[in-house]
């Protein structure tokens, strides 16, 4: 039996637009972000994809993205599971700071290490490794069993919580995953085989 996993990064947020480190802060979507979420919902509907189960983080931008997608897919009355395990990486003391100002203060290289190294956390925050340490056990306990049972599961989450999942599912190295940019509103759709391994991807 093959399960289908749909990963969607939230649409552009107000803080993406302002170029601020966001992490666990809670801005909503911009008009552009709303459009991205609606477009992804429409694309899934056009492809005839109807998820069985819906997951998102505890943050507004991902929840709003999922709500807008459901509206476009004309899917009503479903249970949505929200869990902090799917939250964006915690950016710690960088949260709320402008990314360009941070480069001026700490240097380009240090900021790149905080943003795109695997295991160096920003001050008071989480590395990608730390993020994976909460996201993956949740995926394995709650979501993988559904995929193994042949279900279609939609997760609306964040750049770095989704990176942690993509890394595990595609079997990528830390170097490979850190080069992978997941665009706002962008869906990634996997077919997951009975052994939990990636069988293929669906392009929309
Ligand atoms: O939390 C944030 O600031 C962004 O959504 C993701 O940040 P990144 O591009 O530095 O990974």
Image (cartoon, rainbow, N blue to C red):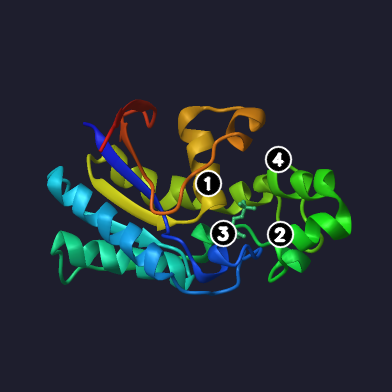
Q: Is residue 177 left or right of residue 191?
A: right
Few, some or many residues within 10 Å of mark 3 (<14, 14–19, 20+): many
The CA span between labels 4 and 1 is 15 Å
Q: Quadrant of residue 113?
A: top right
Q: Residue at x 65, y 32 (%)?
A: 174
Near-viewer residue (49 or 148): 49
Q: Is residue 106 left or right of residue 34?
A: right
The CA span between labels 1 and 2 is 27 Å
Q: Nearer the viewer, mark 4 or mark 1?
A: 4
Q: Is residue 105 left or right of residue 12?
A: right
The CA span between labels 4 and 3 is 15 Å
Mark 4 and mark 1 lie on one chain; the one further toward the N terminus is 4
The CA span between labels 2 and 4 is 19 Å
Near-viewer residue (13 or 90): 13
Mark 3 and mark 1 lie on one chain; the one further toward the N terminus is 3
Secondary structure beneath dot 2 equals helix
Q: Quadrant of residue 34?
A: bottom left
Which residue is labeled 3 in the image? Answer: 88
Q: Which mark is residue 72?
A: none
Specify the farthest residue to the top: 199
Determine if residue 82 is in view: no
Secondary structure beneath dot 3 equals loop
Q: Residue at x 50, y 56 (%)?
A: 158
Q: Residue at x 27, y 40 (%)?
A: 4
């Amino acid at each position: 039996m093959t399960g289908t996993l749909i990963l969607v990064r939230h649409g552009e947020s107000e803080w993406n637009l302002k170029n601020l480190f966001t992490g666990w802060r809670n801005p909503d979507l911009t008009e552009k972000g709303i459009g991205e979420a609606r477009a992804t919902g429409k694309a899934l509907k056009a492809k005839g994809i109807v998820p069985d189960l819906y997951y998102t983080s505890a943050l507004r931008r991902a929840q709003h993205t999922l709500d807008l997608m459901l509206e476009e897919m004309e899917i009503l009355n479903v249970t949505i599971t929200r869990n902090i395990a799917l939250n964006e990486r915690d950016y710690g003391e960088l949260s709320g700071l402008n990314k360009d100002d941070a480069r001026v203060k700490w240097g380009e290289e240090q900021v790149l290490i905080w943003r795109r190294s695997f295991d160096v956390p920003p001050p008071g925050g989480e590395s990608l490794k730390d993020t994976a340490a909460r996201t993956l056990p949740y995926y394995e306990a709650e979501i993988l069993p559904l995929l193994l049972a042949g279900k279609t599961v939609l997760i609306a989450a964040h750049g770095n919580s989704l990176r942690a999942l993509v890394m595990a599912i595609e079997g990528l190295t830390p170097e490979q995953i850190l080069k992978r940019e997941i665009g706002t509103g962008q869906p990634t759709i996997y077919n997951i085989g009975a052994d939990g391994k990636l069988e293929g991807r669906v392009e929309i």
